Image: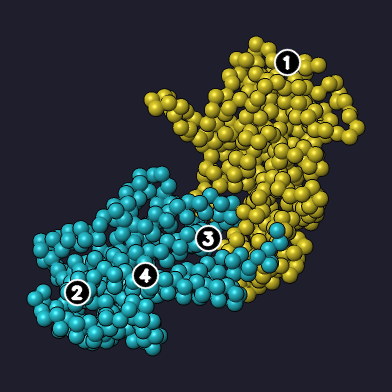
Amino acid sequence: MIAAAEREYDAPAREASAATVPLLAVEDLVKVYPAARATLFGRRRSLTAVAGVSFELAAGETLAVVGESGCGKSTVGNLVLNLITPTAGRVRFDGEDLSAVDDARWRDRRRDMQLVFQDSRSALDPRLTVGAQVREGLDIHGIGMPAERRAEAEAMLEAVGLGGFADRYPHALSGGQQQRAVIARALVVGPRLVVCDEPVAALDVSIQAQVVNLLSDLQARLGLSYLFISHDLSLVRHVADRVAVMYLGAFVEVGTRRQIFDDPRHPYTRALIGAVPVARARRSRHGRPVRLTGEVPSPLTPPAGCSVHPRCPFATERCRVERPAALRQPDGRIVACHHPETVP
Amino acid sequence: MNLRFVVVKALRAVLTLWLVVTFVFVVLRVTGDPTEQLLPDDIDPGIREYYRAAWGLDRPLWEQYLKYFQAAFHGDFGISFRNGLPAAELIWQRIPKTLELGIATFVTALAMGIPLGVFAALNRDRWLDRLTMSFAVFGFSMPNFFLGILLILLFALHLRVLPSSGYGTVGHLVMPVITLATAFAGAIARFTRSAMLEVLTRDYLRTAEAAGAGLSRRVWRHALPNAAIPIVTIVGFSLGGMIGGAVITENVFAWPGVGRLLTSAVADRDLSIVQGIVVLVAVTMVLANLAVDLAYGWLDPRVRLGARERSR
């Protein structure tokens, strides 16, 4: 009986409840870079780009990671895809712990986890035709017969609205077309997760809508999960199911789109949401938007205690010494703040 | 690659050749009289005049110049003052030997320089990179004649495994090729490294990695072709330097090529030979540069297809 009970505890989550296992589960991801010494004989310093990030992403869901530039959101995307090796932490994809697998398995897994870059112009190899680049993923993963790959790549280009562009070189495409080529390149191998790192930041607003709609259509059609990294809150409001707000390498608040946009709890989130200009000013439940003072501290010298405290108007003595834990609130969101409820 | 491009390049090449030949022609003739070099000091002035007339040196400079060009267009580069044989023929005989040395050097230098540069770039700022680049700088800075002599001391005198000089077997080729290729490979390795470093940080390489491409695919399919333009440029320029280096190296190893012919011809003030070789070197340089220009078009679709197709 004891053995049976133990087996139940040890049973891999994958088998126990395939439906509830998130597609992607990230636990305590940390990335520390060694930094140059400040002086010749100074202490060797380190830069913590990502300081313990955890989240889950369900199949078909879009999680947006928002934050100011330099907060580490792109690093999170690269860590998830193992394009940067994490200092600590785990990435589980479909129940498989990817921090434990070797390079060959990783290359194989990349078929399921693709990347769409911000700068589509530089994300495409200038020396290869668009068709050849879309086909490359099929070649790498040995998908389909070699003879069919060309047609497959052309079908994918067709799907993103670039039918007949296969023989063009990237420089002959407009910015929006290039980004659609990048999307075709990512999706041709049939991934389940796509990390979109500022996918439309480099595009004109009119083209942004086009590309975002394309991403939404493809998600609905193919059941994709997106890890959507962006600093553009109006865009995030449009695409995200859930939103993670990042500050100095850590998530300060994670909740549904509605929770984050309509009822932000963390002072930093409230400052961020309040900073978005809206046509018709709508007061949040918590009254006036919070205004942060000062600049983001350097990640080389992060503040003690809560990372937001030097700029937070509500900071108390406790905030200055004790780093707040990310706690799940009654409504399901996660907030890393000592006083989320006391804030006016 | 349109016609206009080719015509402009060809015209420029012809202009370059004309300038070089004119410069050498004038300089060689104003710096001294070949008869003083070739004939004994105490010779009868009548005999000296006879030779000057026979070689056309008594004519005004502009007349010599026109005659020279007229003949050159018919493939006649004059006769050697030393043995009366046609200069073109004497030079032509030496070309295969210099070419043999040049091609062997070229292949060796590329085979060493490019992989070393790629290797250093992939190990950027680690000790392997520093070691590789130290060798490259060493190879590049070491004078040809000095390295050649060191090699002779080591392999010919001390170890007695290679012939010290001359021409004939593959063994004769080894030391001159090492001497020439070391400097060349050092330069190529440095340029390959910096070109690769610039390309390796590009997003499309991360895209390729994210797509699951392994290291060798990323390097050979994506990085190196994109890094090729600066590498091709330095290779093209180095071809000229290699010819200059070959003059010294051929003398160190008594290699019977064009370089040695040039040194003896200069010492003898054998005008036709010197001029002929200068024309040959200039033609080689011009062709190398033309090849580089054409290679750009082949390497970069943006150059190949011209600006017309660019959308922005």
State the residue position of label 4.
B23
Task: Give the residue furthest to the right.
Answer: A280
Q: Is residue A338 above or below residue B222?
A: above
User: Do badges 2 and 4 share one subunit?
Assistant: yes
Give the Cα distance between marks 2 and 4: 19 Å
Amino acid at circle 2: Asp
Location of residue A318 by image quarter: top right
State the residue position of label 1.
A314
State the residue position of label 2.
B268
State the residue position of label 3.
B226
Q: Position of residue B264 (x, y in %)?
A: 20, 73
| Residue at image point 38% right, 25% down | A41
Q: Nearer the viewer, mark 1 or mark 2?
A: 2
Residue A212 visible in rendering? no
Give the Cα distance between marks 3 and 2: 49 Å
Give the Cα distance between marks 4 and 1: 82 Å
Amino acid at circle 3: Asn
Question: What shade has chain A been given?
Answer: yellow
Describe the element under mark 2 as helix, strand or loop: helix
Q: Residues within 10 Å of mark 2 (few under 14, many from 20)?
A: some
